[in-house]
Image: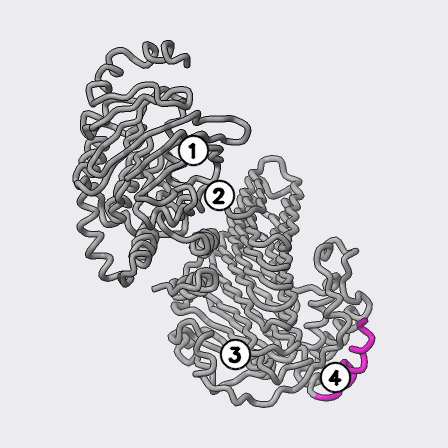
Amino acid sequence: MLKITDLHASAGDKEILKGISLTINAGEVHAIMGPNGSGKSTLAQIIAGHPGYEVTSGSIEYDGQDLLEMEAEERAQAGVFLAFQYPVEIPGVTNAYFLRAAYNELRKAKGEDEVDPIEFLDIMEEKLKVVEMDATMMQRSVNAGFSGGEKKRNEILQMAVLEPKLAVLDETDSGLDIDALRIVAEGVNKLKKPTNATIVVTHYQRLLNYIVPDFVHVLAGGRIIKSGGKELAHELEAKGYDWLLEPAGV
Amino acid sequence: MTAPYADQFAAFAANGGGEGPSWLPALRQQAFERFAALGFPTTRDEDWHFTSVTPIAERTFKVVKPAPTALTLSDLEPWLVDESWHRLVFVNGRFEPVLSNFAGLPADVQVSTLSEALREEPAWVQQHLGALAGFDRAAFTAMNTAFMQDGVVVRVPKGEVVEAPLHILHVADAQVNGAAIHPRLLVVAEPLAQVQLVESYVGLGSATYLVNAVAEVSVGNGARVDHYKLQREGSDAFHVGTAQVTQGRDSIYHSFSFASGAALSRTNIYTKLAATGSEARLNGLYVLDGAQHADHQTFVEHLAEACASRELYKGILDGESHGVFNGKVYVDPIAQKTDGKQTNKALLLSEKARVDTKPQLEIFADDVKCTHGATIGRLEELPLFYLKSRGIGADNARALLTYAFAAEVLETIEIDALRVALEKAVFERFTHLRME
């Protein structure tokens, strides 16, 4: 589904990704872990098409297409979704309007008819249950005045509505208490299908107790310095990152 | 530049302009002399630094006696907002009884045209007309006072709360080309009275005309006046509107100015917080495109203790448009415990759009809280990316964020039907989508 080959990227003059290669197949969950400043979030944002980074070399192939040639909205329409580490507040636009606009854009891209607000209410009723959110949240402005936990739940709600093929969760666990973490993780698990794939970017192992990865990659200094199975996450939990950094020359 | 108006004034005074109680021609004469002496303001005047009225001054707009209109209520449907409101309709400056409907007002609330009030209660009108809107240093107010044709007089007696808004709708159509309209509004809310006014100006064609409106609003002790002004003049029109307000003890004056029309417009909102505990809320939104120019000037005078003023003005500018916001606040030495806050924000959608903003605070009391803030900017990258990352295309994402920028100030509109109508108008203007 996703094939990243020798990806180099920078922000301004600073090179952040220094040759990332990664292949992700349908049905898989990949965890990307690493210390702060390792480039984890940069990788997540580049996949989604963040305008703040420049890809200097390498490629990303998504479903046979050149992902880097696609606009952010085209990527979303093709099934790529990023759950933001810091979801953006948009005062003045209700969650209901925003979600329906996004939902309809994806339907249009697939050649399907748009749904009207009444039909959308029915769809939302079911999706809100996935993240245990109250319907009143729909009438509030997007993320405006939301607590940290509400914002993260709102990201997963969007994921539930948009049903991406490739979901990238960028530090979705940061700032969550244990109950919110459980709700968010269960939401992600409910949305999992054999035809879609998930990338979980996280600093800590605790989210991986709930969302169990098939593969774990350690990113440091802009490169993947180790890959393994889910047991690697436990090893990192016990030993930290340092034992990997020095041999890798980071 | 005012010279061509001398003949007009003489003719006007001889023909209809001389009507009314005996004090009125004298007031007009005095005002005209002042207008002639002042001349049109220039950019050398501090209050007009960013707005050149040359396009107005170089023309001679004629005061005419308009013919009865052929327009029907269905022609005005888009501008009525809510048909259940009390409504006075003027077309090209002429009161149109058939299009108006304010029979449902409480019996003791006096609403009439200025000309009727001058016939029925000349002494009361004399007491209030011109009492607030001085023209000593205001050429346009002097011009209005000299040439005012008709207008509306509203008197809400003590303790009366008028439930439905009172809509004063001024329509200009193609027949108004080359004309000047000088409407007048006189509002007296007696102690503890409450009334909501919607003063709207609409142009139905591309005529070139001048509307020069003056409103005088007296808000009594404990009274509340909500004053909405919608300026949607025709694209080649000129509009100058001045509201002069005085507020009694514990009163509230809430003003909202929406401006999206006219080639050149200037809106003045001046309020005097003249007694303890009074509060002014002045909000506004202007939406400009092409070569439009819109200037708002507010002036809040804190003249008593423990008064509050809140201002939020926002502008959205596209094309080569030019917006001006000048917010003046004066705090008298006696006005301790003043609480003032002024915010103005402009969003530039194009490279050539321009905004000049000038907050002016003159504070002569020491125990006060006064803040002001101004921002001028473009749409931010991160919210755009957020929307795009959800599949929303770049154009729609920009449109949605532009609407969102306006929504913050539209939310301050307390008349639901009006808020919804303006939200819809702004939303559809930018998104080209329909809002349910």
| Disc 4/disc 3 C-alpha distance (Å) | 23 Å
Q: Around disc 3, counting alpha carbons within 10 Å, would you say few (fewer than 14), some (14 to 19), or many (20 or more)? A: some
Amino acid type of disc 3? Ser
- Residue B32 is situated, as x and y percent measured from the top left of the image, at 76, 73
Return the mark for residue B112: 3
Residue nearest the viewer, comparing A172 with A2: A2
Q: Residue at x 47, y 56 (%)?
A: B222
Residues flagged by tags 2 and 4 on a common chain: yes
The majority secondary structure of the magenta stretch comes to helix
Amino acid type of disc 1? Gly
State whether residue A16 appears in this view: yes
Q: Secondary structure beneath disc 1?
A: strand
Q: Is residue B326 left or right of residue B158?
A: right
Q: Are marks 4 and 1 in contact (CB under 8 Å)?
A: no
Q: Residue at x 72, y 70 (%)?
A: B56
Q: Earlier in the sequence, mark 4 or mark 3?
A: 4
Count of labels in the image:
4
Q: Residue at x 58, y 35 (%)?
A: B367
Q: Name the residue that disc number 4 marks.
A: B13
Q: Name the residue that disc number 2 marks.
A: B381
Which region shows up in magenta?
B1-15
- Residue A184 is situated, as x and y percent measured from the top left of the image, at 23, 35
Q: Nearer the viewer, mark 4 or mark 1?
A: 1
Q: Nearer the viewer, mark 1 or mark 2?
A: 1
